[in-house]
Image (cartoon, rainbow, N blue to C red):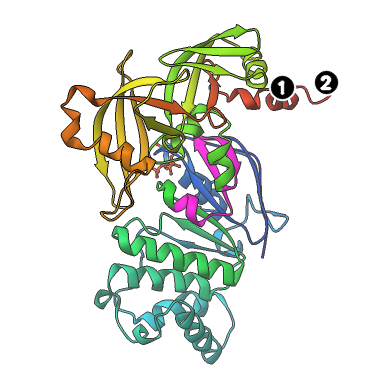
Amino acid sequence: MSSIDFTSVRKVYDGEIVAVDGFDLTIESGEFLTLVGPSGSGKSTLLRMVAGLEDITDGTISIGGETVNKLPPRHRDIAMVFQSYALYPHLSVRENMAFGLKRSTNLSDEEIYERVDDVAELMGIPELLDDRPKQLSGGQQQRVATGRAIVREPAVFLFDEPLSNLDAKLRKHMRTELQRMQQELETTAIYVTHDQEEAMTMSDRIAILNHGELQQVGTPRDVYNHPRNLFVAQFIGSPSMNVFDVTYEPTDDGGRLVGDVDLEIDAERAAQIEDATTDELKLGVRPEDVSVSRTSSEEHVAAYVDIIEPLGGHDLLYFELEDTGSLVSTEAATLSDDAAPETEVQERKAFIEPESISEDAHEVFLHFDLEQIHVFDADTGLNVAHLDELEREIAPSA
Ligand SMILES: Nc1ncnc2c1ncn2[C@@H]1O[C@H](COP(=O)(O)OP(=O)(O)OP(=O)(O)O)[C@@H](O)[C@H]1O
């Protein structure tokens, strides 16, 4: 078990392409940390620098307290699992799993095959040990590739999108398997993925990257509920957070957000907004924090039903705002046929059944849960709830 420390890590390719810029992070021993971010944000570069497959332009990376910048990959005590499983086609599963150990340790054949048997048991593949890779399904090959990494008992696992070649169902299954395996072994792991659902379900913490810079690191719940900036807010969560352009107007007992929508806010949030660098703000609200009703109230936003996407367990509903035409998504439970009538959800659902969309009565009123809204400074993208925290970072002695 080993912690991993990144200190001011920077990577520049060809003297001009800045792939990673001033990356600072400590991954605790035994932690499962996922790196997410859009394509080109520097995830693979970071992973490859930990593995020793890429030079570090500036800064240091330490594993278990030892700086590894100049250490060759084979001395770093890491094992990497890639998107392509890279199994040797002419070797059996048993030989594939034993291959690395035979080359890099002084263990006897007997000890090596004993370890291979134990790991095959852990990965649920003992009956495949005599097969060749081409006889295996994608999921089975993935297990062998992971098993081959585990057999080496490394201090650190590095996963580079290991599930992206699998179909959706198998992916979910393997996600659970990898989690179980990691909990059992308690090996420090860095996992790179595009798939934010994978990140949310598997990780102890998630680090979100954009343009080579760390945007936020925290538990899945933390980054979802308290996004530090607009980028994180929109990147994490599916469907994405709804975002509106608004400006702020003070009132006697708080303030109002006015623009695409018009909402009253309390004094605490008003005080946060007053610290923003600009009057231009972005209001964010997650789909599950928007509710729909037929009746108007003081704090509502008038909208029209646009699209209904049935997703099985629930429906995803899209509305167009009456005044501005902005689209808003929200979620509603799908009703079973025998659900009690008169429930609020059923009434809501009945009101927006597709048949009713063409009728005049399809105007609805959206209510935002004011406790759950997020406000961002449009210039800096920062969540106004984090502005004072940022000031402390900039001027720690103040
Ligand atoms: N060998 C290389 N030479 C030059 N530029 C590179 C090299 N590898 C990566 N880059 C650039 O560095 C930046 C970060 O790339 P990287 O592959 O780390 O991103 P990523 O987040 O892993 O992307 P993806 O999700 O598409 O794999 C990109 O601009 C990319 O074009």
For residue 30, which quarter of the picture? bottom right
Question: Quick one: 67 or 125, which is closer to the camera?
Answer: 125
**Residue 324, horizontal then vertical, whole percent:** 33, 14
Q: Label 2 near label 1: C-beta < 8 Å?
A: yes
Q: Element under label 1?
A: helix
Looking at the image, residue 107 lies above or below residue 312: below
Q: Is mark 2 within 8 Å of ligand 1?
A: no
Q: Earlier in the sequence, mark 1 or mark 2?
A: 1
Q: Is residue 241 magenta?
A: no
Residue 202 located left or right of residue 87: right
Question: Quick one: 147 or 365, which is closer to the camera?
Answer: 365
Q: Is residue 307 visible?
A: yes
Q: Residue at x 39, y 81 (%)?
A: 125
Q: What's under tag 1, amino acid-wise?
A: Glu
**Residue 256, horizontal then vertical, whole percent:** 55, 12
Q: What's under tag 2, amino acid-wise?
A: Ala
Q: Residue at x 22, y 37 (%)?
A: 353
State the residue lying farthest toward the bottom. 110
State the residue lying farthest toward the right. 397
Question: Quick one: 26 or 338, which is closer to the camera?
Answer: 338
**Residue 243, horizontal then vertical, whole percent:** 43, 24
Q: Residue at x 54, y 27 (%)?
A: 370
Q: Magenta segment range?
A: 198-219
Looking at the image, residue 143 lies above or below residue 223: below
Q: Which residue is mark 2?
A: 398
Question: Quick one: 299 or 372, which is closer to the camera?
Answer: 299
Which quarter of the image is occupied by the N terminus? bottom right
Residue 129 located left or right of residue 393: left
Residue 126 badge: none
Q: Element under label 2?
A: loop
Q: Which residue is mark 1?
A: 391
Which quarter of the image is occupied by the C terminus? top right
